[in-house]
Image (cartoon, helix red, strand yellow):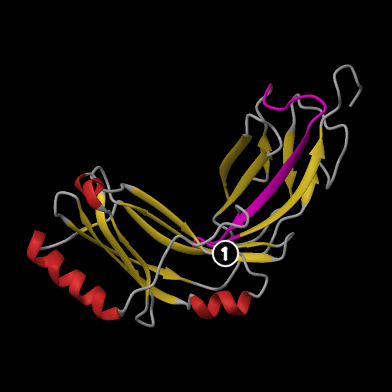
Amino acid sequence: MTRRKAILAGATLLVGVYGFAAGADKESGSSVPFAAASVRLEQNVTDGDSEVVFEIRGGTEGLAKLTVVSPDGRTVIDFTAPGASASLGIRQFRFETPEPRDVKRLTSAYPEGEYSFAGVTAAGEKLHAKSTLSHTLPATASFLRPGADARGVSGKNLKVAWTPVKNVAAYMIKIEQSKSTLGVNLTSTMPGSVTTFAVPDGFLRPGTEYQLAIGTVSHSGNISFVETTFTTPANGAKP
């Protein structure tokens, strides 16, 4: 999960939501589903923090308005494209909360249940969706290869391997080199039946430290990450 990002969503009075919905009905009549609209809970077990993530995609048209209402009736996201940009809108959104170590504080602000998504495109079409947030997180995997904080890991024919976890929908693998000026990173989602990932030859540089994360993805979409680092040998050094 990405670290220490402030939430981009704001809060408005519930009456504002009803006013927006009524206006949308006048603009476009019946609504159509979003291309994508979801909410999930992510935890980084290594860092001991968690966050709630919203992902919304309106389709081919940009959204001029977007609101998301929580199960207890609060508006947790309220977006309106300003000025001239409203003629195009924004097509895709990803909102992330801060990552407090106090999980109870986070889950209190974002309760379990059904979240309602409503939007209006720049052309006036109304969109809708619902997504259910669960606070149940999947169990975590353990690193097998490379081991935690491993040194001298060959970048050739490297297969990342981890322990299997029961009842998961998928695994997410992330390899990052945040100190590089190129910002090198790789993310892949694997089926829940797979416990290895072949790193493409040539992706890893010699003498470089990388951050490796393995996420277990539940059937509700929640993710539990564990992280470690590994280092490749310098040029000419034996792994």
Picture residue at 72% right of the left edge, 27% below the top:
204
Where's residue 145, x and y in %? 79, 41
Q: How many marks?
A: 1
Q: Is residue 203 magenta?
A: yes
Residue 232, horizontal then vertical, whole percent? 82, 30
Measuring 14% from the left and 49% from the top, which residue is drawn there? 123
Q: Is residue 221 visible?
A: yes
Residue 160 or 54: which is nearer the viewer? Answer: 54
Going 67% across and 50% down the picture, which residue do you hit? 214
Q: Residues within 10 Å of mark 1 (few under 14, many from 20)?
A: some
Residue 206 appears in which quarter of the rendering? top right
- Position of residue 147 relative to residue 135, above or below, is above
Q: Is residue 182 above or below residue 88?
A: above
Q: Which quarter of the figure is the C terminus placed in?
A: top right
Query: Left or right: 163 with respect to 151?
Result: left
Residue 129 is situated, as x and y percent measured from the top left of the image, at 29, 63
Residue 33: percent from the left, percent from the top? Answer: 24, 58
The quarter holding residue 234 reads top right
Q: Secondary structure at mark 1?
A: loop
Determine whether 226 is above or below 194 in the image: below
Mark 1: amino acid: Pro
Residue, disc 1: 98
Closest to the observer, 192 or 132: 132
Task: Decide: is 24 above or below 190.
Answer: below
Residue 159 magenta-highlighted: no
Tell me the magenta residue range. 202-223
Q: Quadrant of the N terminus?
A: bottom right
Say whether residue 98 is left or right of residue 164: left
Q: Is residue 193 visible?
A: no
